[in-house]
Amino acid sequence: MSDKAIINLEGKSYELPVITGTENEKAVDISKLRAQSSYVTFDEGYKNTGATTSGITFLDGEKGILRYRGYNIEDLAEKASFTEVMYLLLNGELPTTDQLGTFENNLTQHTLVHENLVKVFEVFPTGSHPMGQLMTMMASLSSFYPDSLNPNKSPEATNLTIIRLLAKMPTLAAMIQKKGKGHPVLYPQNKYDYVTNFLYMTFGNVTEEYHADPVVVDAMNKLLILHADHEQNCSTSTVRMVGSSHANLYASIGAGIAALWGPRHGGANQEVLEMLEYIRDKDNGDVKKVVAEAKDKKRLLFGFGHRVYKNFDPRANILKKACDNILAKLGVNDPLLAIAKELEQAALSDPYFIERKLYPNVDFYSGIIYKALGFPTPMFTVLFALGRLPGWISQWKELRENNEDIGRPRQIYTGPVQRPFPDMKGRK
């Protein structure tokens, strides 16, 4: 006999089914509770609510486990390319040599963006935030591809939209970086792989040949892989919620970008660098003082601990090695990075941080690497979006394939009860 949960309300008992996932996660199915009892459950922020079943990403925060489609993140970051991980997330299996070749060739054929979209991009005010630009251009893509507005078309049409979006995202991100520097936009080159092409469009120059450093390409691959999906976080849940209305893919991803922009989510790695700048400029680089104030709860440190991981962030372990390799290879001499390394050492050795498991997280190391590679701080969240894109699309695709119902959370109303409408003279 399968497990059931019993809830007693107003003298009546209700049996609720128990769902067990493939990794033995258990959930009480309350989907029929309101119909049977008129009660709803209350869970602020959905921290303890499973809004969907999903076969994409498994996360165990207590044990520090992250897997895409059953594969450990450590293996994927070490052995796979970002395009392999894209294929895995979208299709459920790692590609064969032929499948990967076809997939990468399809991406290559769609990297250019419409010249009229470039004109739209050109009118953004100087200094406008990169995430605002990305969000606007993402939504604009639906105007340039009206055939994608109906997500209920054939699987072939949906796949073309997915390929277009994956292919054009690096081009859009690179355009934003170039605009920020006042440099001419570089068009994609089919001779490069996905990550190298992005680095070329971002750091290349019209006046000279571009040569990608293998260490930089490897670090960028790892960063994108580690950000590719992370279960039902704020932006992913937003993509699924918007997608549940049968909005087109561009609109759904645009909503995800908006959610990612917030400093409590994707903007966290930007906050890390801004914190380091504050320590440099306002605290004269005095890390010991900063650590002491953090322990006395007089200061909040960004980039330490994690909302989900209660032990360690497995992605941070991978990025720590990549970070050390990048700094050594590039020979970067930056006071901000020196402050970051001193903070890291304090967090890894001080009993206060160790006992509370406040280890450096993925945002801490990704910010340091992006800084070392030459990305300006406001671009960090755009890079997060570039990595997260295949995960968002996979989640949207899964929702559509499962024909899930429209998302419609309930609430507990706490406003005024019914009251009479006073005329103007009677109002106070």
Image (cartoon, rainbow, N blue to C red):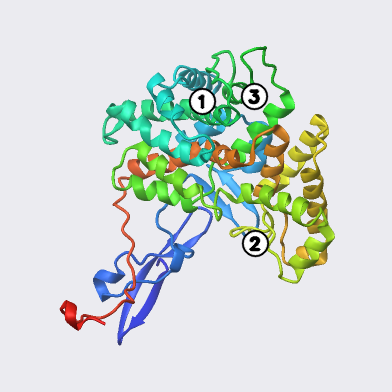
Q: Could you say which disc has been placed on residue 63 in the image?
A: none
Q: In this view, does 49 lie above or below 271?
A: below
Q: For this view, does 139 lie left or right of residue 212?
A: left
Residue 257 picture location, percent across and down: 46, 43
**Mark 2: amino acid:** Lys
Q: Could you say which disc has been placed on residue 203 in the image?
A: 3
- For the N terminus, the image quarter is bottom left
Give neighbour class at mark 3: few <14, some 14-19, many 20+ (Cα, 10 Å). Answer: some
Residue 162 picture location, percent across and down: 41, 30
Residue at the (30%, 42%) spot, across then down? 247
Q: In this view, does 393 lie above or below 216?
A: below
In three-dimensional space, the C-alpha distance between marks 2 and 3, rounded to whole angstroms, equals: 37 Å
Q: Could you say which disc has been placed on residue 310 in the image?
A: 2
In three-dimensional space, the C-alpha distance between marks 2 and 1, rounded to whole angstroms, equals: 37 Å
Looking at marks 2 and 3 on the same chain, the residue that comes earlier in the sequence is marked by: 3
Whether residue 33 is visible to the viewer of this picture, yes or no, is yes
Query: Which residue is denoted by mark 1 in the rendering?
Result: 171
Give neighbour class at mark 2: few <14, some 14-19, many 20+ (Cα, 10 Å). Answer: some
Give neighbour class at mark 1: few <14, some 14-19, many 20+ (Cα, 10 Å). Answer: many
**Mark 1: amino acid:** Thr
Residue 214 picture location, percent across and down: 72, 24
**Mark 3: amino acid:** Phe
Looking at marks 1 and 3 on the same chain, the residue that comes earlier in the sequence is marked by: 1
Residue 49 picture location, percent across and down: 44, 63
Residue lying farthest to the front in this orientation: 425
Whether residue 314 is visible to the viewer of this picture, yes or no, is no
